[in-house]
Amino acid sequence: MIAGRTSARLPLLINELERQWIFDYEIWESIYLPSVKASINAAHRQIVEFAKEAGWNEVLIAEDDFVGTHENSFKYFMSKKPEDYDIYLSMVYMGDIDNDNCVRNFSGMTMYTVHSRFYDTFLSVDPEEHIDRALNGLGKYVVCNPFAFIQRNGFSSNTGK
């Protein structure tokens, strides 16, 4: 699932999906609320709510500005998915990463997988906060090592830079 598509980023998004050999996906429209952080939070939450209602065991979510660090990033990311996780992240901007790739106090949800056992917790966080910051300390978060995806350079909807 792709959270929050913007028309200016659509060609880059489609190119990256094809470059990574990702063909089974759904692109969701952006959500615009008075607060950017609430908009991003709502975009991610709607997909987790959908996965929960559909009874999916997990859901992979990507923002529309993700880019692989390699042409085989998606294959690598999926091959390294741990057995035990609440959220499996493709990268983080900041965080305390342990030797087993568990991460605490993280920021960055460019691409990640949420396990079904964590859906209710994910959906329980404050909808007015940055989703990644609101989730800190609530579950077992594992980050791919090395990072498989990063945010594309350019304008960030979150920071406005």
Image: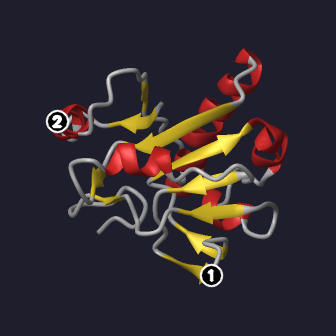
155 vs 49: above or below: below
The amino acid pointed to by label 1 is: Asn
Q: Nearer the viewer, residue 150 or 5?
A: 150
Reading the image, the residue beneath label 2 is 15
Residue 155: give x, y in percent of width and height. 25, 60
125 vs 49: above or below: below
Q: Check disc 2: other Cα within 10 Å, few if <14, some if 14-19, many if 20+.
A: few
Residue drawn 47% across and 68% down?
145
Q: Nearer the viewer, residue 52 or 156?
A: 52
Q: Check disc 1: other Cα within 10 Å, few if <14, some if 14-19, many if 20+.
A: few
The quadrant in which residue 15 appears is top left
Could one spot residue 130 in this view of the protein? no
Residue 29: give x, y in percent of width and height. 42, 27
Could one spot residue 89 in this view of the protein? yes
Reading the image, the residue beneath label 1 is 99
111 vs 159: above or below: above
- Mark toward the start of the polypeptide (1 vs 2): 2
The quadrant in which residue 139 appears is bottom right
Distance from disc 1 to disc 2, alpha carbons, whole Å, reads 34 Å
The amino acid pointed to by label 2 is: Asn
Q: Nearer the viewer, residue 6 or 58?
A: 58
| Figure quadrant of the C terminus | bottom left
- As drawn, the residue found furthest toward the top would be 54
